[in-house]
Amino acid sequence: MTDSMPARPQRSRDKLHSSVASAFEARILSGDLPIGERLPSEGEIARDFGVSTRSVREAMQILETKGLVRRRHGERTTVVRDDVGEYLGTLAVTVRQLLAGDPDYLLQLMVVRRMIETEVLGILTARDQPVDAAVTAALEGMRQARDAGDFAGFIEADAAFHLALVHSAGNKILSVYYDNLSGLIGDVIRVSSRVPSKSLDAAYAEHADIYERIRTRDEAGAKALMRAQIDNSAAYLRVAIENANRKDEDDA
């Protein structure tokens, strides 16, 4: 009986400092505590939460480990990240640098892109109004570029179409991550579009078909078309990478 007693205060203290950390994390991520905001002193926080200053210090250590606050000796703790978007943005940039450093990783990017964009279609087709104005505008941009024979403009509108679909889902975390990869995805679209001999007419028709399936809430049909389109792009990208590697070998 006596041997088990010391464990109880430890569990209680763990729960107390975790509750303090969770409360401040929620306020930081919601924007209630903006970046640069100085938190109250440890004593004030301890009084507000009815805990010891030790529990407060342990809570601040958790927040610092997560990169949400900065602690300096003799100063009050400061919020250093205003929302989860900055963290995800940093993570996405790191991934982008990794991909840019090794072209083979671009093929893995296509797998991630397919996973994101096909699942987004499920969200869109479940809504009362599945197609956003930005998606419609991007498709119209593709049509105008097709009619003008503007390859560069078509590729720009193509990338905008896929980006608009992701944004239309309304998931802020997903949008932040995709935004940071969109530049690289745009590069992939430019490269893969030059490999086959597909006309702008055919490329536009593919996107218009996906658009129509979304508009009519045909989830299965839209997903099948999107998967096929991205898989084809991945195959074209593989050819482009192999051609580039072969050229490097010849030059060497």
Image: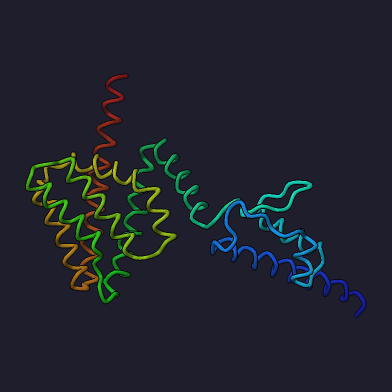
Report the side of 45 relative to 87 (left or right): right
Q: How many marks?
A: 0
Q: Nearer the viewer, residue 250 or 167?
A: 167
From the image, which quarter does the C terminus lie in? top left
Residue farthest to the right, as pictured = 2
Q: Residue at x 40, y 41 (%)?
A: 99
Q: Nearer the viewer, residue 108 or 132?
A: 132
Q: Nearer the viewer, residue 211 or 100?
A: 211
Percent x, y of residue 250: 27, 22
Percent x, y of residue 17: 74, 66
From the image, which quarter does the N terminus lie in? bottom right
Q: Is residue 210 above or below residue 107?
A: below
**Colouring of the image:** rainbow
Q: Residue at x 50, y 52 (%)?
A: 86
Percent x, y of residue 22: 64, 67
Residue farthest to the bottom, as pictured = 1
Residue farthest to the top, as pictured = 252
Q: Is residue 44 above or below residue 99?
A: below
Q: Quadrant of residue 167?
A: bottom left
Q: Residue at x 52, y 52 (%)?
A: 87
Percent x, y of residue 137: 20, 57
Q: Quadrant of residue 26?
A: bottom right
Q: Residue at x 60, y 65 (%)?
A: 27
Report the side of 119 relative to 208 (left or right): right
